[in-house]
């Protein structure tokens, strides 16, 4: 009997020890709840750390609903969206628009102004000429005549005008038929920011919202920071840089490798320069920008890609709190002083 | 087998019954731990979504092919050796499609233009994301 009690005591002690030691060995991801949906033309994953699965699931669903609502406003590819209606409307008249759309356009026009128009939110017609829409993609560049016709008629200034009255009601005016809204360079960022707002309002303070590789984090993952790998623009399975993010930081990437076709050995990608009507061949393959506002840095990553290294980095100096990592076609990656992330020394642009 | 015999030899040489108990219990815990680790990473069925709505649930233990009518036509989802993948839809370019085999719990394959998403799920654990990274920027 005495021996039995001794054995039971040891057994109990071992069980207690097991449950004390187990969390040390378990990977911290075990406390991360993740859900993925197809939204905004990509896979959106929302991960929450340290909450019960029921609370995390309910909150994630609310955030997805918000992204879905914004898609109905911002996507020109969605029939019946607010942007789609505006693009179909007559030109040269003022049209009242929703606050969400007004905010996105406001950010877009700010970047347009700072880049002297190499970034523009009125390029939907040009995008269609090139065939860079979601469902169909051509593999031959459009004729020079079509592009030069578009360049001739696309206004160099005030293509898209925005007005905000005393009641904070936004109105928009598109100058002519060659101007139509394409918010692809800002929409995902705004959706990410809005999803984060929903999470915060619902008491979630440790999370990551990832929309097809563009993301924003809040808080941490327990004692760890959020670990983000940056894809090699030329080798999709390879990670070339790792960033450990925490608190409130977004990270948005623009590159020539997501939507493109190769014709006669030339890579034609979806980031278009309104000054030339052609894909932006600036010597870069990928630009990643970090900052607190996902909407803003979403646009900045595109603008920086079009401008190229020198002009782009100079433009970025106008936006305090933003940092960038540039991957050139040849040569070594370049990053600004406070960019968070180490570049693997094995990275080879070739 | 050799390892097991060695272990039994160690137990037989143990000085007291308490030593034996400690060894047996330790082995038991190691086995439980290994089981927990593997069962959280491996999925046991796949969920197929159309426009973010769950359409079908298929066991990964049965090799099979199933057809889903997506936005651009028929999409074939194949399950083989506890893995799943999107095989094809009627588009020669497979734009917006992730076609590789997926197997771990939480892994996803999707054809965005078709509106079809395939996800590996483990019904014992609601938590997921076993990747080394919390996100891939691209």
Image (spheres, coloured by chain):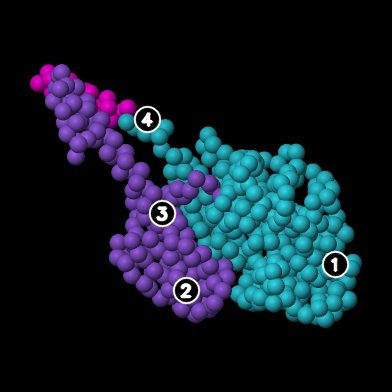
Q: Is residue A8 above or below residue A278?
A: above
Q: CA distance from mark 1 to mark 4?
A: 62 Å
- Specify whether B36 is left or right of B94: left
User: Closer to the N terminus: mark 1 or mark 4?
Assistant: 4
Residue lying furthest left? A1
Q: CA distance from mark 3 to mark 2?
A: 21 Å
The disc label shown at residue B88, or none: 2
Q: Could you tell me if the residues under marks 1 and 4 are in contact, i.e. CB atoms within 8 Å?
A: no
Q: Residue A10: within the magenta?
A: yes
- Specify whether A34 is left or right of A151: left
Q: Is residue B15 above or below residue B54?
A: above
Q: Could you tell me if the residues under marks 4 and 3 are in contact, i.e. CB atoms within 8 Å?
A: no
Quadrant of the image containing the C terminus of chain A: bottom right
* Residue count near mark 1 (Cα–Cα under 10 Å), binned few <14, some 14–19, many ≥20: some
Q: CA distance from mark 4 to mark 2?
A: 47 Å
The image shows residue A117 at horizontal and vertical percentages of: 85, 62
The image shows residue A236 at horizontal and vertical percentages of: 57, 57
Q: Quadrant of residue A77?
A: bottom right
Q: CA distance from mark 1 to mark 3?
A: 46 Å
Q: A25 or A95, which lies in front? A: A25
Q: What span is in magenta? A: A1-17
The disc label shown at residue B104, or none: 3
**The chain shown in purple is which?**
B
Q: Colour of chain A?
A: cyan
The image shows residue B81 at horizontal and vertical percentages of: 33, 61
Q: Residue at x 77, y 63 (%)?
A: A280
* Residue count near mark 4 (Cα–Cα under 10 Å), binned few <14, some 14–19, many ≥20: few
User: Closer to the N terminus: mark 3 or mark 2?
Assistant: 2
Same chain shared by disc 3 and disc 2: yes
Same chain shared by disc 4 and disc 2: no
Q: Secondary structure at mark 3?
A: loop
The disc label shown at residue A21, or none: 4
């Amino acid at each position: 009997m005495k021996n039995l009690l001794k054995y039971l005591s040891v057994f109990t002690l071992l069980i207690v020890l097991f449950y004390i030691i187990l969390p040390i060995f378990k990977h911290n991801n075990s406390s991360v709840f993740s859900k993925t949906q197809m939204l905004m033309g990509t896979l959106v994953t929302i991960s929450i750390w340290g909450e019960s699965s029921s609370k995390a699931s309910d909150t994630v669903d609310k955030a997805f609903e918000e992204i879905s609502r914004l898609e109905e406003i911002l996507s020109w590819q969605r029939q019946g969206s607010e942007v789609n209606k505006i693009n179909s409307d007559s030109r040269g008249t003022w049209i009242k628009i929703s606050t969400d759309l007004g905010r996105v356009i406001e950010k877009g026009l700010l970047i347009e102004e700072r880049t002297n128009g190499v970034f523009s939110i009125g390029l939907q017609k040009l995008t269609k000429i090139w065939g860079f829409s979601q469902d169909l993609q051509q593999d031959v560049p459009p004729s020079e005549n079509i592009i030069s016709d578009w360049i001739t008629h696309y206004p160099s200034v005030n293509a898209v005008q925005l007005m905000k009255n005393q009641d904070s009601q936004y109105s928009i005016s598109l100058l002519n038929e060659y101007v139509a809204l394409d918010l692809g360079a800002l929409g995902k960022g705004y959706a990410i920011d809005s999803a984060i707002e929903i999470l915060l309002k619902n008491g979630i303070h440790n999370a990551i919202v990832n929309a097809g590789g563009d993301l924003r984090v809040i808080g941490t993952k327990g004692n760890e920071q959020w670990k983000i790998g940056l894809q090699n623009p030329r080798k999709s399975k390879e990670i070339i840089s790792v960033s450990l993010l925490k608190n409130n930081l977004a990270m948005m990437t623009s590159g020539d490798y997501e939507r493109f076709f190769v014709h006669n050995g030339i890579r034609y990608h979806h980031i278009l320069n309104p000054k030339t009507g052609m894909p932006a061949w600036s010597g870069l393959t990928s630009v990643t920008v970090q900052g607190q506002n996902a909407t803003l840095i979403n646009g900045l990553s595109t603008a920086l890609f079009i401008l190229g290294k020198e002009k782009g980095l100079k433009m970025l100096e106008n936006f305090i709190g933003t940092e960038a990592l540039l991957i050139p076609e040849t040569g070594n990656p370049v990053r600004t002083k406070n960019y968070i992330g180490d570049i693997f020394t094995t990275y080879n642009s070739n | 087998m050799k390892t097991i015999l060695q272990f039994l030899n160690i137990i037989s040489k143990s000085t007291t019954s308490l030593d034996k108990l400690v060894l047996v219990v330790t082995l038991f815990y190691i086995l439980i731990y290994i089981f927990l680790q593997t069962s959280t990473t491996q999925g046991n069925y796949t969920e197929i979504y159309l426009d973010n709505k769950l359409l079908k649930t298929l066991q990964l233990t049965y090799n099979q092919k199933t057809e889903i009518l997506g936005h651009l036509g028929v999409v074939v989802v194949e399950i083989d050796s506890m893995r799943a993948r999107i095989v094809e839809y009627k588009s020669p370019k497979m734009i917006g499609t992730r076609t590789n085999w997926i197997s771990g719990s939480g892994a996803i394959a999707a054809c965005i233009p078709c509106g079809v998403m395939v996800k590996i799920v483990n019904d014992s654990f609601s938590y997921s994301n076993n990747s080394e990274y919390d996100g891939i920027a691209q």
